[in-house]
Amino acid sequence: MQMLQAILIGLPMTILVTVLSLALGTVAALPLLAGLRSGNRLLWLLSRGIIDLLRGVPPVVWLFILYYGVSVGALRLTALQAGVIGLGLVSAAYLAEIFRGAISSVHSGQWEASSALGFTRTTLWRRVVGPQAWRTAIPSYTTYSIGLLKDSSIASTIGVAEIVYMSNQYARQSGEGILIFFIAAGVYIALSLPLGILSRHLDTKMRKVVAR
């Protein structure tokens, strides 16, 4: 019981890091996506370079760089800020590719028909491309979200008191090594299951919307 209590102390921080990182990544992915779809070669190269750089370096390295290497005068990022920004930036690179693939899956005839009907750009994205692309992106987006939930444990390396950090602290203090980490694994599974169920629900709902 004490083990579970120790783990649950870190649960809110795990959820907070995951949600904030995913939100930051989703927002930051949009300009990268725009660059990938831009006809401007310079913007495309810049976006491609940023994405490859963010994906090519392990997330833990970005966290170390932000936490130990970024400072303005006497001010520096807190462990939570460094963790969220680092994981958020890496998320942006992966999500930009997910969104790009989803948009590319929309048949070219949809774009041509919308143009022929005189749809505005806003209507095109809101009523035609958006729903179809989002339905395609949902499985990959949810899968990445589940992966990010697990990757939030990386933030423990810089002192963010999430599930793994609290589990490690308890193991050191109590001397009971492996069992608490099995319990922590069960908690991660319990957190991941609702995301998978939500993904299937949204996919079914979006299929109905697109089929209208």
Image (cartoon, rainbow, N blue to C red):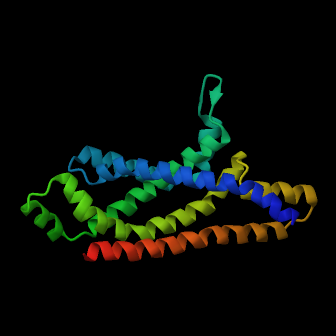
Please tell me which residue is depicted at 71% across the width and 68% down the height of the picture.
187
Q: Please state which of residues 205 and 151 is positioned toward the viewer in this rendering.
A: 205
Q: Is 10 situated above or below 111?
A: above
Q: Nearer the viewer, residue 120 or 50?
A: 120
Q: Is residue 114 left or right of residue 55?
A: left
Residue 22 visible? The answer is yes
Which quarter of the figure has residue 195?
bottom right
Quarter where residue 208 is shown: bottom left
65 vs 32, left or right, is: right
Q: In the displayed structure, would residue 170 be above or below residue 89? A: below
Residue 120 spot, x, y in % from top left: 15, 53
Q: Residue at x 61, y 51 (%)?
A: 17
x, y percent for residue 153 = 67, 57
Q: Where is residue 197 in the image (x, y as percent from the top left)?
A: 53, 75
Q: Quadrant of residue 64?
A: top right
Question: Which residue is rendered at x = 88% and y = 56% of the image?
Answer: 172
Q: How many labels does the image show?
A: 0
Q: Which residue is drawn at 56% across and 65% down?
A: 147
Residue 150 picture location, percent across and down: 62, 63
Q: Where's the C terminus, which quadrant?
A: bottom left
| Outermost residue to the top | 73
Residue 58 visible in the snapshot: no
Q: In this view, does 31 lie above or below 15?
A: above
Relative to residue 142, is residue 13 drawn left or right? right
Q: In which quarter of the image is the N terminus?
A: bottom right
Q: Is residue 3 left or right of residue 24?
A: right
Nearer to us in this view, 192 or 209: 209
